[in-house]
């Protein structure tokens, strides 16, 4: 499969690189990394819409200087670029999320080693941080968990480390499902079920905790099913969106009967927690 690699210059770079990453993720861009104050973004040629891309760039140009170039690259080359630019995630002294080519650091209480592949983006480290920190602060002993939009499976792996009795990890991308299963095995996890599909897979299931780190539009479309599949007194953790989108997410959740618990922010990204 052929991919487009976009090289995007932004002046100023922050926080616009994160804002652009979020918008591109909603039009089928699948991977991002930042290097030398440039944003690199990847999309399958068959999924690319010039009209959608140009619309986002034109809106952005109202607030920031933008330069864009792109080229076609084979799938294998994209994956190599993705992996080589994967940055580790550190959560205080509690958790290090690293790739096999990163050095271990004994100061962290827990370490998760993942092969990043194509299912983990530097633009979403803030939301990964928020979700992982929340899991570290939550008692999951003997709880049944859903990790929706599981990617590498890092949240699922951490949930098992925190005592979950069963973790269902679902993603719409085949390579993510494969990647999650492999990473679970590499981290000695045996309670994670990695499935290919969408929210319809959980129609006959129920969970004590649901973690969904996706994007605003998908979260809103999934919300009703999340509520149906959440056990009474269960918790729903949502992230993958900016603080400016929190109001819409909260209104949707509360309209379906969920009780708002709290909001956490990190560098303009947001996580919301609800209880049923």
Image (tube, rainbow, N blue to C red):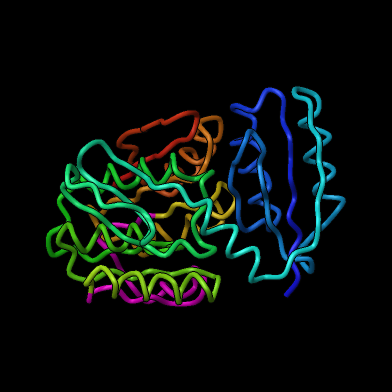
Q: Is residue 182 left or right of residue 120?
A: left
Q: Quadrant of the N terminus?
A: bottom right
Give the camera-side residue of 196 and 7: 7
Residue at 23% x, 47% y: name it. Answer: 105
Give the camera-side residue of 10 and 242: 10
Residue 84's x, y, as percent? 52, 56
Residue 55's x, y, as percent? 83, 42
Give the camera-side residue of 204 and 42: 42
Residue 202 colored in magenta in the image: yes
Residue 37 position by quadrant? top right
Residue 17's x, y, as percent? 63, 35
Residue at 68% x, 58% y: name it. Answer: 28
Q: Is residue 141 left or right of residue 183?
A: left
Give the camera-side residue of 50 and 217: 50
Tell me if residue 142 comes above or below residue 65 in the rendering.
below
Tell me if residue 8 comes above or below residue 49 in the rendering.
above
Residue at 35% x, 69% y: name it. Answer: 183
Counting the numbered discs, the total is 0
Residue at 80% x, 38% y: name it. Answer: 57
Tell me if residue 131 comes above or below residue 224 in the rendering.
above
Please give the range of residues in magenta. 190-211
Tell me if residue 52 comes above or below residue 190 in the rendering.
above
Residue 65's x, y, as percent? 78, 26
Residue 20 position by quadrant? top right
């Amino acid at each position: 499969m052929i991919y487009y690699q976009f090289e995007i210059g932004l002046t100023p770079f922050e926080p616009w690189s994160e804002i652009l990453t979020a918008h591109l993720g909603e039009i089928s861009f699948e991977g991002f990394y930042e290097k030398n104050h440039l944003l690199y973004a990847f999309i399958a040629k068959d999924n690319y819409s010039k009209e959608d891309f140009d619309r986002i760039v034109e809106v952005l140009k109202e607030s920031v200087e933008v330069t864009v170039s792109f080229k076609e690259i084979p799938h294998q080359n994209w994956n190599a670029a993705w992996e080589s630019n994967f940055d580790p995630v550190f959560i205080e002294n509690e958790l290090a999320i690293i790739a096999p080519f990163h050095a271990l650091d004994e100061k962290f209480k827990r370490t998760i080693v993942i092969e990043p592949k194509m299912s983990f983006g530097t633009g979403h480290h803030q939301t990964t941080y928020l979700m992982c920190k929340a899991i570290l602060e939550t008692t999951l002993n003997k709880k049944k968990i859903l990790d929706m939009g599981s990617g590498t499976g890092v949240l699922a792996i951490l949930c098992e480390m925190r005592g979950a009795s069963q973790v269902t990890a679902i993603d719409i991308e085949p390579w993510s499902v494969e990647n999650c299963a492999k990473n679970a095995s590499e981290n000695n996890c045996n309670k994670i079920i990695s499935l290919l599909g969408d929210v319809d897979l959980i129609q006959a299931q129920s969970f004590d905790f649901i973690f969904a780190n996706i994007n605003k539009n998908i979260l809103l479309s999934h919300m009703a099913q999340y509520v149906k599949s959440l056990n009474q007194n269960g918790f729903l953790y949502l992230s993958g969106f900016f603080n400016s989108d929190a109001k819409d997410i909260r209104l949707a959740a509360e309209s379906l009967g969920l009780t708002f618990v709290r909001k956490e922010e990190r560098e303009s990204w947001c996580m919301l927690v609800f209880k049923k």
